[in-house]
Image (cartoon, rainbow, N blue to C red):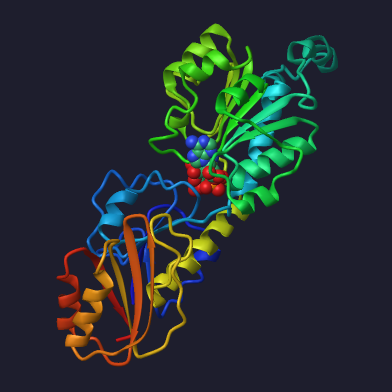
Amino acid sequence: MFKIQTLNNISRNGLDRLPANLYSVANEVAAPDAVLVRSADMHKAPIAASVKAIARAGAGTNNIPVAEMSARGVPVFNAPGANANAVKELVVAGMLLAARNIADALGFVRGLDASGDLHHKVEAEKKRFVGTELAGKTLGVVGLGAIGVKVANAAYALGMRVIGFDPHMTVDGAWQLSAEVAKAGSLAELFAASDYLTFHVPLNDKTRGAFGTQALELVRPGVVLLNFAREGIVDAAALRKGLADGRIGRYVSDFPEADLLGDARVISLPHLGASTGEAEENCALMVVDQLRDFLEHGNVRNSVNFPETRMARTGSARICIANSNRPNMIGQLSHVLGEAGVNIAQMHNASRGELAYSLIDVDSPVPDSLVAAIAAIDGILSVRVIGN
Ligand SMILES: NC(=O)c1ccc[n+]([C@@H]2O[C@H](COP(=O)([O-])OP(=O)(O)OC[C@H]3O[C@@H](n4cnc5c(N)ncnc54)[C@H](O)[C@@H]3O)[C@@H](O)[C@H]2O)c1
Ligand SMILES: O=C(O)CC[C@@H](O)C(=O)O
């Protein structure tokens, strides 16, 4: 029986794919085998030694100590692209909210006194909410991954000029991107050309503060800045300076900040990008399937720290081993197996950066002494036996 701990609400349809005879699922679990999480901050509490995998029902994994998990030989999975459409639609809504003063106009109508001549009040005041159109404006998209590509294509379909920047764009992403989206040679070029600027990059040491004081000097006065990626992507000081001197006309964000809550130029949403029934279900189905494949067969799909590794099962048992990616690890493994008289039926090894992962199907049961001997090899991060 595998014990799964959920740290956030996970879509029921996803959880229903965990058969009750094999899995128990709860919020509070002693010694869980795996954790299912959305946005809960896993940096804040120690992660139990029993945890063999973490599955993020979403895209960003900055709430998970991925480097620490890699050092422990624990894969972290996510659901690439599964919520991209939901975020795209909210980004389009965000551009429209900013362009047409929709939030202010709604506030005005909600505050109207229902008595008297409503029609007159509406017609007299509507000039306060005159907006602009998106068509003909330029949108700069930083990060052309699952979300950025969809946002770029949608903006083009709305009549916007679109320019994008992503030095690591995948071939799949390029296939999906409209040929009408122009490639910016640099971030500086993109900043200078954009009326609307949107970020769709992961938060990491390279992207933290990607919109900072330098960017502020380059952008068009009154630029509409959209941040549906992560709070840290936009530098706090640069944002406040830009709002104060008018360089930033509007800031539309999925991450409310305490001191900006009352600022009429700031439109904040409560981290709603992925909050649609469809996206929550897509993410849960994807990560639950990946988690099952890992726990039951050792296979790895869509991990952010492990290499893709899949092998059909043969033999009586499977040994799953994560190790430091250095010479002679396979040699030492096969030596230890040979010493124990265990024959390798088939094996698959793959590496990613500093980590390597092997699936070894064997013809006979794996004794505890062999597991201990493997674990004792210098550089082994984790060992697990399935189907013994
Ligand atoms: N608001 C929400 O609810 C919500 C929902 C989903 C994702 N997100 C955030 O959006 C981010 C992007 O999601 P995604 O699904 O598009 O991920 P993705 O991995 O498909 O795309 C990210 C893209 O950013 C690019 N990139 C990385 N560093 C870059 C840099 N320095 N400059 C330019 N491009 C760079 C990558 O090459 C990649 O193409 C996630 O990491 C997450 O933080 C937020
Ligand atoms: O789970 C959520 O609601 C947010 C997910 C989002 O931030 C992501 O990175 O996928």
User: Who is closer to the viewer here, 41 or 333?
Assistant: 333
**Quadrant of res 371:** bottom left
Residue 271 visible in the shown view: no
Q: Residue at x 60, y 31 (%)?
A: 198
Q: Is residue 240 above or below residue 75?
A: above
Q: Is residue 78 above or below residue 222?
A: below
- Quarter of the figure that contains the N terminus: bottom left
Q: Residue 365 at what x, y percent from top left? A: 26, 90
- Quarter of the figure that contains the C terminus: bottom left
Q: Is residue 146 left or right of residue 48?
A: right
User: Who is closer to the viewer here, 137 or 181?
Assistant: 181
Q: Is residue 238 left or right of residue 266?
A: left
**Quadrant of res 82:** bottom right
Q: Residue at x 43, y 72 (%)?
A: 299
Residue found farthest to the top: 245
Residue found farthest to the front: 327
Q: Residue 278 at what x, y percent from top left? A: 63, 55
Q: Residue at x 44, y 71 (%)?
A: 292
**Number of on-image labels:** 0
Q: Residue 267 at what x, y percent from top left? A: 58, 25
Residue 173 visible in the shown view: yes
Q: Residue at x 49, y 32 (%)?
A: 255
Q: Is residue 87 left or right of residue 10?
A: right
User: Who is closer to the viewer here, 276 or 33?
Assistant: 33
Q: Residue 40 at what x, y percent from top left? A: 39, 46
